[in-house]
Amino acid sequence: MIETQVDRFLRNCWYVAGWEDEVPAEGLFERTLLNESVLFYRASGGRVVALENRCCHRGAPLHLGRREGDCVRCLYHGLMFNPEGRCVEIPGQDHIPASACVRTYPVVAKDELLWIWMGDPALADESKIIRFWWHTDPAWRKKREYLHYQAPYTLIVDNLLDFSHLTYVHSNTIGTPSNATTRAQVEPIEGGLRVTRRYHNDQIQANRRSIATFDGPADRWQIYDWYAPSFLSLYTGSAPAGTGAHEGHLVPEAMQYRHCSVQTPETASTTHYWFSHAANFGLETSEVIDVVFDGVLRAFKEDKTIIEAQQQALLKGRPFQTVGIGHDGALVQARRLIQRQLDEEDRAVQSAAQATPAAAASRRIALVPAK
Amino acid sequence: MIETQVDRFLRNCWYVAGWEDEVPAEGLFERTLLNESVLFYRASGGRVVALENRCCHRGAPLHLGRREGDCVRCLYHGLMFNPEGRCVEIPGQDHIPASACVRTYPVVAKDELLWIWMGDPALADESKIIRFWWHTDPAWRKKREYLHYQAPYTLIVDNLLDFSHLTYVHSNTIGTPSNATTRAQVEPIEGGLRVTRRYHNDQIQANRRSIATFDGPADRWQIYDWYAPSFLSLYTGSAPAGTGAHEGHLVPEAMQYRHCSVQTPETASTTHYWFSHAANFGLETSEVIDVVFDGVLRAFKEDKTIIEAQQQALLKGRPFQTVGIGHDGALVQARRLIQRQLDEEDRAVQSAAQATPAAAASRRIALVPAK
Amino acid sequence: MIETQVDRFLRNCWYVAGWEDEVPAEGLFERTLLNESVLFYRASGGRVVALENRCCHRGAPLHLGRREGDCVRCLYHGLMFNPEGRCVEIPGQDHIPASACVRTYPVVAKDELLWIWMGDPALADESKIIRFWWHTDPAWRKKREYLHYQAPYTLIVDNLLDFSHLTYVHSNTIGTPSNATTRAQVEPIEGGLRVTRRYHNDQIQANRRSIATFDGPADRWQIYDWYAPSFLSLYTGSAPAGTGAHEGHLVPEAMQYRHCSVQTPETASTTHYWFSHAANFGLETSEVIDVVFDGVLRAFKEDKTIIEAQQQALLKGRPFQTVGIGHDGALVQARRLIQRQLDEEDRAVQSAAQATPAAAASRRIALVPAK
Ligand code: FES
Ligand code: FES
Ligand code: FES
């Protein structure tokens, strides 16, 4: 089944909320994630705070409010909330009920990305954040971008896990004829899949020839680790054919790239998409990464065009029955993995309910998806 | 519960349909009220007629039709209706079936407002119209305006019944710090609530200082009578502190204002909002009322911003649970009053159904809200 | 009942998909018909092919794909389909499953129109296509146009079958006062209705007087054959009064017109509308048809205005109960005819299911309307 609308989101995982520097030093920043509006701001020392962007009094959005110290005051009737989401002032009264609070979300800044945990806060484990370490490593030079999609995140996952589309969607940018004919090797990794494609004696993408470190045929590789629900860490590159790249030996002319693609559902049918691309050669100027990134960006816009058109096509006409092909291997496994994790979250909520009803109740609140 | 959508409207009450002078001397005027499109025009002598704006033949809107004497002709197939809603001509045939009619609504022009009764016509009692007599009293000078809201009328009622928001929403216009800390006195009146706030030794709103009749501290008052479902008649003013205003004695420098705010649901989630503000001093020129009204209008736009944002915030995310505060007293009572009147309308329909089935059936038609 | 939304379309009939010359010699052309997106292109020899515009792999629209010979390749992952809708290439694999295909629709070009059959292909009988032979007859000179309607096709059928509206909607274009007072004669024909109106000693439409072949009073006629669900073939004209036109004798000054109006549902609530108007006199220059067509086009835009307003009026307010009038005769019969044909299609599917379950299953697929 291909959904045009995602009804259930994985909750107990870290999502990207944006680039870390999108949250201003002062002021309030709003973004909708998993169908919830979230308020971000920096408390003392620059620490980012993430609160439910809906005052518990009458529901006014807090991002139209005002900072007062580390707190934010709702500018409807003046309730004030601290960075832990507790109401600390109600104008005209002394007593503040315990229920007067807004949800707070664990957030972590790492590798220039801002990560948020929208599930059970007790399970938020910083060590599970997917790393994109080269974002801050001086041995790599990168560029980054953002796209907003009118499609559910699952259609983007499908796209990322079948590189056969490169030949057709990206024939003028990053694709080569060999993409569609090279069957990928797919293997499970912790929390995801590794998809490996190796091309022997192949050609460099046309639009990258100007910045290539060598002429002639190339051995190329694409190794990408995908993690549920929607993280892609790609290692790709090329070396002069026959110099041992596929056997683990990289000559100095070898060109290596690392790529980060992350999606976070905005709503059931729209998606945030952040990505970056880095090279480890030609670091002195921006020439290499400009050329490479230009192709990547154009390719990603080509993807956006076809995926949003796919979404529209699926919304119309008779019920759609997909016909599987060989290249679907990775995407089918990815869908299964997401489903398995969704089922696990359900089971966790249920078994907690049997063990300690009260704790489970609060956990359930944290896990119940928005209607 | 805070609704983002109102499914049931009070029917047996007078609503404002617009300023009386909005209905042109000639020509046809359309406005949607309580989710019904209504046609207004002036019959002989200027009397305003209000008809269901949907021809009983095939549903074409009558406001695209043509006046012929006191009648209106549908310009689709030519049926003609008189001011009582009866079809008086069907082209090509002599017989006119009794069912060939459109609803007609009782309308009354009063205090520059046009009032309409959209419930059981037999219950329409002109004496129940809320009066805003100062609209036409030469001892008062007023200005008036209209706003269209992308929010249900209930969110506006909430706003009007909790003046603590003045301090926060209107800090630059009509609010003072004292609004949020002064608890209002709330008492029931016939069909509504009276909310009284008295401020002792307080300050005049900053933006009104230029037109003030006196300097120094002021005793201020806000007395507003709210009537279900959505009428506000406000009497407010200020006098030099200690001159007896709160005890009923007004010195000549006392500045008095009267304000009218009425809402009529347009649809389940949009609202018409008419209001006026009047002063009883500085009547010779428009200076005083210009200054005062400018602040009121800016304040009302501030309200619109926060209320429409609240509506959007309530529409998104998990189900919303409101947390009550002390200042909610009046709005909670108002919501209960509206609910009680809705329940009464239901009971009236049911008991009528038991007494005289036929009469009840027609009454039910008049009362059943649109789907 | 007047629907603002059509839930079931007649399937076993020919619909117009467009002007035949809208499908380019090269390239791909998309149009939504009966809520399905259809891809059109010309295979060898100019023959038009119509395919379901949704790749069977993951649903990408094929009109964003690429022609390769007589085939079309999906530019997502590269599946290629032949004009029969069969997948003939899946990149990276040899085996092509039998299920890898898209629907194909019978199409026929006739009378400058492109006709499509969206029901059971086994029943597509070219001889049942409604003919508009004068489109290509040199004895007639025509102009043609297209309108897109924000209303279900049924509201347009209603309009076309009650010419009493000409007097009111088209008082400044093609209507005359006599339209509304002349009762039409309605008789059944194969698959439709014939509506005949004859006007004796009447006047020519004001806007056609400049091109009239005679002065003075006219005998006029309108004979239109309507076929379910939405085809109108109109023969109309006028001759000097008393020269025998109504008895079958046409003097040389007689002015004859032929008109074609066809609607195809785009979605449940939007409609494609193609029409043409032809005259058989003044053929040397475009003057006559320019004058006549100008009036027709303006009239059709007047219809569009009132019908789209009717649709909006029906969508709002209480449930609508139509009141019938005498002029409704033809439209009521037309609605019944459509309903009868819909019921027949249902019965055919059911009885096929009892006879040969397997064949019926595939037929059912062909007939089941989109959800
Ligand atoms: S809605 Fe925030 S204080 Fe009332
Ligand atoms: S819809 Fe008004 S006359 Fe037909
Ligand atoms: S969607 Fe067409 S080839 Fe994949």
Image (cartoon, coloured by chain):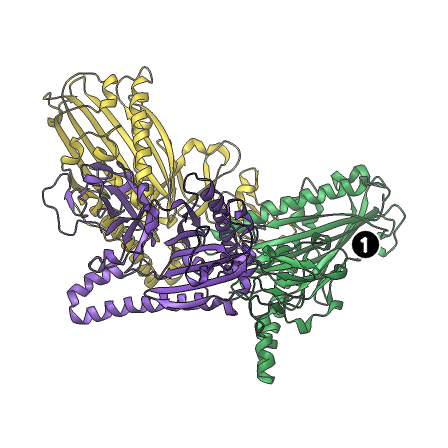
Chain colours: A green, B purple, C yellow
Q: Is residue B37 left or right of residue C181?
A: right
Q: Is residue C177 above or below residue B74?
A: above
Q: Is B173 or B304 nearer to us in this picture?
A: B173
Q: Is A199 or A158 nearer to us in this picture?
A: A158
Q: Is C139 or B103 nearer to us in this picture?
A: B103
Characterize the local packing of mark 1: few (<14), some (14-19) or many (20 or more) Cα atoms within 10 angstroms. Answer: few
Q: Is residue A114 visible?
A: yes
Mark 1 C-beta closer than 8 Å to ligand 3: no
Which residue shows up at 61% across the image and 76% down it? Answer: A348
Element marked by disc 1: helix
Instruction: Specify the subunit that label 1 lies on.
Output: A
Q: Position of residue C25 (x, y in %)?
A: 50, 31
Q: Is residue A219 left or right of residue B48?
A: right
Location of the N terminus of chain B by quadrant is bottom left
Q: Residue furthest bottom?
A: A355
Q: Name the residue that disc number 1 marks.
A: A136
Which residue shows up at 46% across the image and 69% down it? Answer: B329
Q: Position of residue B174 (x, y in %)?
A: 52, 52
Kind of residue sitting beneath label 1: Thr
Q: Is residue C23 above or below residue B271?
A: above
Q: Which quadrant of the structure image shows residue A358?
A: bottom right
Q: How many marks?
A: 1
Q: Is residue C67 left or right of residue A274?
A: left
Q: Is residue A6 visible?
A: no
Q: Position of residue B13 (x, y in %)?
A: 29, 59
Q: Which quadrant of the structure image shows residue A17?
A: bottom right
Q: Residue furthest right?
A: A252
Which residue shows up at 21% across the image and 62% down it? Answer: B363
Location of the C terminus of chain B by quadrant is bottom left
Q: Position of residue A8 (x, y in %)?
A: 56, 65
